[in-house]
Amino acid sequence: MNQRGTGRRERGITGLETAIVLIAFVVVASVFAFTVLSAGVFSSEALKQTIFAGLKETRSRLRQNGSVFAFSAKAGTTQSVYKIVFIVSNSLAGEPLDLTAPYTVDDSGLDPDFDSLAVPATIISYADEDQRKGDVPWSVNFIGNNNGDQLMEDGEKAEITVWLMDRDYAILETADNAVQPMDTLTGNGGGVGGIEATDVLIGKSTRFVLEVSPQIGAALTIQRSVPPGLRQVMNLN
């Protein structure tokens, strides 16, 4: 009698242990599944952030608006393009773009004027069939609605002037020597990095490329040709 009762108790204990093992297995499996799913979610989020970061690097944050204008005057007695002007806006909503310029203008003496306090984040290069300038002087003027800082934000537009030669405002624009080649010293007034005395002047029918390279994002590329007849102001579109 007593031996048969012991057998039933052992079978009952064995069943209880089996149930506990099954419950433990379910709990462990649930935790494992949650861990795998969480890892998958975190991996997907990290991948998404990486993709967005890559897109930000490859997309240009600048958009050129409207026409590109070239201005010419006489370097010595030779008519030559000395500056190029165009308007840009921000192409990525919610992403301000630093357009702190290395130069300013005041329409007196030699322009442009080097700004020793500026810390530019954008570089502009110029190239044509005869030469390439990796960091040319440029100035900026925000137009229309803006908040007065140097960050181009949603809805703002900026007029960029690329200076290829110095303009001497003590001389009439139609007179000889109204523009001068640049030298290598900012202390002499005017710009550094543009067309120098040993370079080829930018004359008629010159094809050129401008690249505006912000700190983040792809460069804005502008390709144009100077007309076969030079005028003081030329629409290059």
Image (cartoon, rainbow, N blue to C red):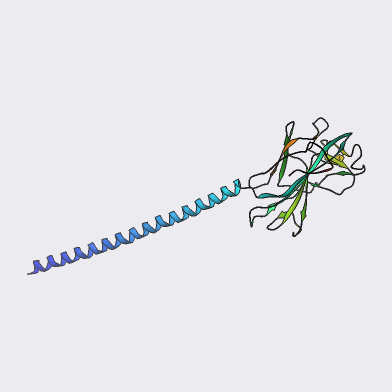
Q: Which image quarter is the N terminus in?
A: bottom left
Q: Position of residue 206 (x, y in %)?
A: 76, 35
Q: Where 143 sits versus 235, above or below?
A: below
Q: Where 50 sits versus 199, above or below?
A: below
Q: Nearer the viewer, residue 49 or 162?
A: 162
Extreme front residue here? 229
Extreme left residue here? 1
Q: Quadrant of residue 156?
A: bottom right
Q: Position of residue 157 (x, y in %)?
A: 73, 54
Q: Nearer the viewer, residue 24 or 192?
A: 192
Q: Where 115 sits versus 226, above or below?
A: below
- 117 with respect to 50 (left or right): right
Q: Nearer the viewer, residue 227 or 152?
A: 227
Query: Which residue is depicted at the point 76% across and 54% down?
Result: 142
Count of number-bearing discs: 0
- 209 with respect to 197 (left or right): left
Query: Which residue is depicted at the point 84% across and 48% down?
Result: 105
Q: Where 2 sits versus 145, above or below?
A: below
Q: Which image quarter is the C terminus in?
A: top right
Q: Position of residue 117 (x, y in %)?
A: 79, 49
Query: Which residue is depicted at the point 71% across and 43% down?
Result: 123
Q: Quadrant of residue 186?
A: top right
- 160 with respect to 50 (left or right): right
Q: Nearer the viewer, residue 192 or 93?
A: 93
Q: Position of residue 192 (x, y in %)?
A: 80, 39
Query: Which residue is depicted at the point 9% across and 69% down?
Result: 2
